Image: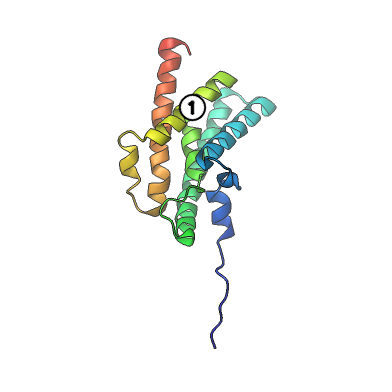
Amino acid sequence: MKTDLPHKRAAWAWTIATFFGAGFGKPGPGTWGSVATVLLWATYAWALHPTPHALLIALAAVIVLSLALGVPAATIVARESGRKDPQFVVIDEVAGQAIALLFSPVDLRHALIALLLFRLFDIVKPFPCRQLENLPEGWGIVLDDVAAGLYALGVASLLRVFLGV
């Protein structure tokens, strides 16, 4: 007796990998994932008025969680979708954008600088970002954006220190 059961998706993985559906935004799902991250950071900062230390800890928690849950979730979703690096997987943008926001003052100018720099480095993929895409499954999906986030963090920090931006 043959049964044709529909393919069951791992709901938790799809929820995390698409960052609660942000990855289904059109056009440019990666930008939607980044914008969602900036909006959550700004909402937390403006609504709860955390100390800079508390904000740093919250961003670190987001980064750790997005990596710890994002790598396996991205792996599962890539396998289930049959794609090596599905565009709708945006948990990698969450990790990278959160890294780019580290040490940023909470205001619109710095939020935009972090967003624009991260998106630039995520798209251009300077060394070693592009090479990190070759890592297996979820590691390759996520770690190239971590590297792009580090580039954005570095440039944004240099702009603040040397140009007062």
Residue at the (48%, 27%) spot, across then down: 116
> Is 134 placed left or right of 37 in the picture?
left
Q: Which residue lies furthest to the front in this view?
A: 27
Quadrant for the N terminus, please.
bottom right
Q: Nearer the viewer, residue 114 or 56?
A: 114
Does residue 50 lie above or below 2 as drawn?
above
Measuring from the top left, give residue 127's x and y in whole percent.
Answer: 30, 35
Q: Nearer the viewer, residue 44 or 126?
A: 126
Mark yes or no: residue 89 visible.
yes
Residue at the (51%, 44%) spot, across then down: 90
Does residue 157 lie above or below 73 as drawn?
above
Does residue 79 lie above or below 120 as drawn?
below
> Is 31 placed left or right of 146 in the picture?
right
Mark yes or no: residue 104 visible.
no
Measuring from the top left, give residue 4's x and y in whole percent.
Answer: 56, 78
Q: Which of 119 and 53 is in front in this view?
A: 119
Residue at the (47%, 52%) spot, across then down: 74
**Residue at which label 1 appears:** 116
State the SS at label 1.
helix
Image mark count: 1
Measuring from the top left, give residue 110's x and y in whole percent.
Answer: 53, 21
The amino acid type, in three-letter code, at marker 1 is Leu
Q: Which residue lies furthest to the top in this view?
A: 163
Q: Residue furthest right?
A: 47
Question: How would you rate the neighbour count of disc 1 (Cα within 10 Å): few for under 14, some for 14-19, many for 20 or more?
Answer: some
**Way the structure is coloured:** rainbow
Quarter holding residue 150: top left
Q: Residue furthest bottom?
A: 1
Does residue 102 lie above or below 85 as drawn?
above
